[in-house]
Amino acid sequence: MEWLNHAWNAVWNYAGPVALGLLILWLVAKADDWLAKREKRD
């Protein structure tokens, strides 16, 4: 199963940073939404 390990590493090397970037963008959007709701409530 050595080829599978190499394939997984290759996928992770490309998908890892992309997934991390999307996660950060999602968290920023969530935080922005939460802050907007909090400001409206005050």
Image (spheres, rainbow, N blue to C red):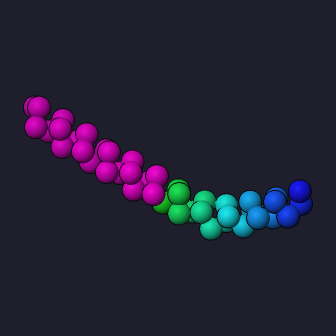
What residue lies at 10% left-to-right and 31% top-to-bottom?
A: 42
Quarter of the image holding residue 40?
top left
Residue projecting furthest to the right:
2
29 part of magenta stretch: yes
Q: Give the farthest residue toward the top.
A: 42
Q: Which of 18/3 is in front? A: 3
- Of the pair 42 and 21, the residue shown nearer to us: 21
Q: Residue at x 82, y 59 (%)?
A: 5
Residue 6 x, y percent position in the rendering: 81, 64
Q: Is residue 33 above or below residue 12?
A: above
Is 28 situated left or right of 19 in this image? Answer: left
Using the rendered view, name the quadrant where residue 4 is placed: bottom right
Q: Is residue 1 above or below residue 30?
A: below
Q: Which residue is rendered at x = 45% and y = 57% of the image?
A: 22
- The percent coordinates of residue 23 (x first, y second) are 46, 52
User: Residue 32 at what x, y percent from top left?
Assistant: 26, 48
* Residue 2 located left or right of residue 37: right
Q: Which residues are magenta?
A: 22-42
Residue 40 located within the stretch drawn in magenta: yes
Q: Residue at x 31, y 51 (%)?
A: 29
The N terminus, quarter of image: bottom right
In the depicted structure, whether residue 8 falls above or below residue 28: below
